[in-house]
Image (tube, rainbow, N blue to C red):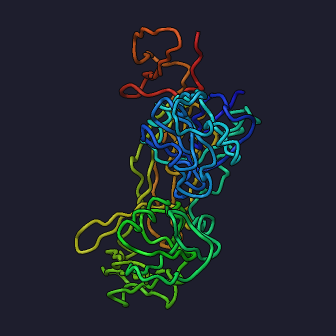
Amino acid sequence: MKAILALEDGTWFAGQSFTGPGEAGGEVIFNTGMSGYQEILTDPSYYGQMVCMTYPLIGNYGVNPEDMESAGVHPRAFLVREYQGRPSNFRATSTLADFLRQYNVLGVEGLDTRLLTRRLRTVGAMRAVVSTLDLDPDSLVRRARAWAGLVGRDMVARVSCAAPYRWEGNAPVTGDGFPETADGRFRVVAYDFGPEDVTLRIQLDRTLRLVGEPGTLRIDGTGPRGDVELVPELAQLQSGSPQIVAVESGSDRLLATGPGATTITATHPAAQSPASLDLVVVEPAKARLVFEPATARIAVDEAAVLRLYLEGLHDERIERAEMAGPGVGFSIQRPEAIAWSPPVLVGRAAAAPFELAATYLPYLARPASAKIEVVASESPSEMRITPPAASLAAGQSVSLKVEAQWPGLEGWREVRPGAVDWD
């Protein structure tokens, strides 16, 4: 069953579903593990994401209930190069396809995962939609760009426990409090922010007795992505210089009150040590917006990264912060020529040099502008395929990369897969 994966930068990939019809939207990321796909699928930190496996053969050892890291599957889709539906493992109790269907998660194979990984390594995690129902790449790209994303959403609440539980017999048991025992173990309350079960098993190996409580704030590197600013109930922020930054009591929001430098510290009752942030507030009169690079020459169907920064002077040093989100406005002289989803710039139609401008109204900083030129992709001066030659046996496959040189553009540039016709 044919499936299409489309990214917000306009790139799209064709594949086949190995779990039946369906579609999913989310943030697409990659994982380089050569094994452990069941642990990845049941890891709560992947909630709201679509996982691409870089290892080319997935499913060859099946799944089993002993390798679960939580009670369910958390990614919205599973993207692989080749799916093996005949597992060879004495521990397997089910195929990967049946396992994904059980949790209503779409599995897609036949994708060029090498090219997808290169795009993600260049641009970063991107919004995407994968579908067997809608096979129009342009429609899927529009839907990917319309997805709200993970920032600003409390993902912890979706994977935390609904009620306290005890950890006994290598598994969670409903109930609160500690059982009356005389084994001398330490008693520890663990806030549940979406941990893997292996984390709790390791803690027990260190002679701890655990009780899980519903989580309200992610305080370390584990757990799902999302905006940790959403739940400040237990966090406390303090500023070393109130004249520079005001921290409202019981809030996680900062208000710059004057230029200078300070250190912000955050404490939490469940954290072993506080976190700190060195903060510089620059004077508006000395600040400006800048694009990097200031000029971009791209081809139709080519994607490039164009970042916007706020620069300001402090103690004769230039401080720089990347700008995005509310307050940033953009104007484009030729909007039909490009697709602009900061920081990704995609060529849509050939156009002479024109201006892309940016303003940041809350700060009244000097605006920034970048010169953009889009070169028609139908007239490259030269093209090449990497590798230039390949020898394959029956049943083997090879990933090809198509690059082109356009007049006025330096070097070889990768061509979007959907823009290539193969004979």
Could you say where residue 172 lies in the image, as x and y percent from the top left? 56, 67
User: Does residue 267 appear to the left or right of 39 in the view shown?
Assistant: left
Nearer-the-camera pick, 3 or 361 = 3
Q: Quadrant of residue 97?
A: top right
Q: Residue at x 46, y 37 (%)?
A: 117
> Where residue 384 sits in the image (x, y, percent)?
43, 16
Residue at 53% over, 45% down: 38
Q: What count of labels does the image hold?
A: 0
Which is nearer the eye, 257 or 211?
Answer: 211
For residue 218, side relative to residue 290 (left or right): right
Please tell me whether residue 384 is drawn above or below residue 54 in the rendered image.
above
Residue 77: % across, % down:
62, 44
Task: Tell me residue 412's x, y (percent).
Answer: 39, 25
Question: As rendered, which of 48 and 100 lies closer to the eye?
Answer: 100
Tell me the residue at 42%/41% (across/down): 33
Does residue 40 appear in the picture of this structure? Answer: yes
Residue furthest front as drawn:
182
Name the residue located 33 percent from the left edge and 76 percent from the top edge.
276
Q: Quadrant for the N terminus, please.
A: top right
* Residue 280 seen in this snapshot: no
What is the quadrant of the C terminus in the image? top right
Q: Is residue 331 above or below residue 304?
A: below
Image quadrant in which you'd find residue 203: bottom left
